[in-house]
Amino acid sequence: MAAAVEQATESKGIAGDKDENISYPLTVHYCGVCTLPLEYCEFSPESEKCKEWLKENLPDVYDEMNEAAEQMGALDINDASRKRQTRGGKGQLKLPKKKNVPKKVCLSRTQRNKKKYVTIVTGLSTFEIDLKKASKAFANRFSCGASVTGDDKIEIQGDVTDDLWDFIPDKWPEIDEDSIEDLGDVKR
């Protein structure tokens, strides 16, 4: 019966690919630091500690892994200069500030639905104001949603253009009423 099962698996190619150099059952070494198999230690957050543990406890395997890495060329398990990517990726690219741009805050209003409007504020970054903090201040002041949508653009839910004329100079004294411009209704 066992011969029939072995013959069936060999005909499918499952057990027929046995290598004579490998002894079965396989023995897998696990790291004492991260508890992963040794070939995955380089991906753990504690890869340096894993290398030290491997060098102390399994020096022959450590030497084999170094040789394999040297043969592959680009991979080196002793590469301490490798930087880990933080969560969130590289983030938004910060564009260089344009110095010859006139310092002016522009307010405009666009229609979202039949009776709903969105107020758009642009030009705050020319006064070196943090847009995230400004959008949070707008959201708290007007009890609505406000978000940064472009490199120098804040969208505020609702028609608050009249209230912004008073709020912006009060919140940021470096912006006077002369540097605020109302563009009126703008289509998207």
Image (spheres, grey):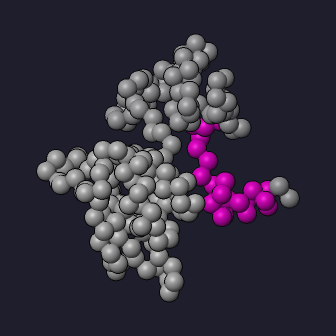
Residues in magenta, as a range: 3-23
Asked if the stretch drawn in magenta spans residue 13, the answer is yes
Q: Name the residue nearer the viewer: 38 or 134.
A: 134
Residue 134 visible at all: yes
1 vs 174: above or below? below
Quarter of the picture holding the C terminus: bottom left
92 vs 109: above or below? above
Question: x, y percentage for residue 27?
Answer: 68, 32
Question: x, y percentage for residue 120?
Answer: 38, 66
Question: x, y percentage for residue 178?
Answer: 25, 57
Direction right: furthest residue: 1
19 vs 50: above or below? below
Q: Is residue 93 left or right of residue 157?
A: left
Asked if the stretch drawn in magenta spans residue 187, the answer is no
Q: Is residue 64 left or right of residue 105?
A: right
Question: Residue at 56% of width from left, 27% of height from top?
Answer: 46
Question: Residue at 30% of width from left, 49% of height from top?
Answer: 175
Question: Residue at 67% of width from left, 54% of height from top?
Answer: 15
Residue 61 visible at all: no
Question: Residue at 47% of width from left, 59% of height from top?
Answer: 147
27 vs 178: above or below? above
Quarter of the picture holding the N terminus: bottom right
Direction bottom: furthest residue: 114
Q: Name the residue nearer the viewer: 47 or 142.
A: 142
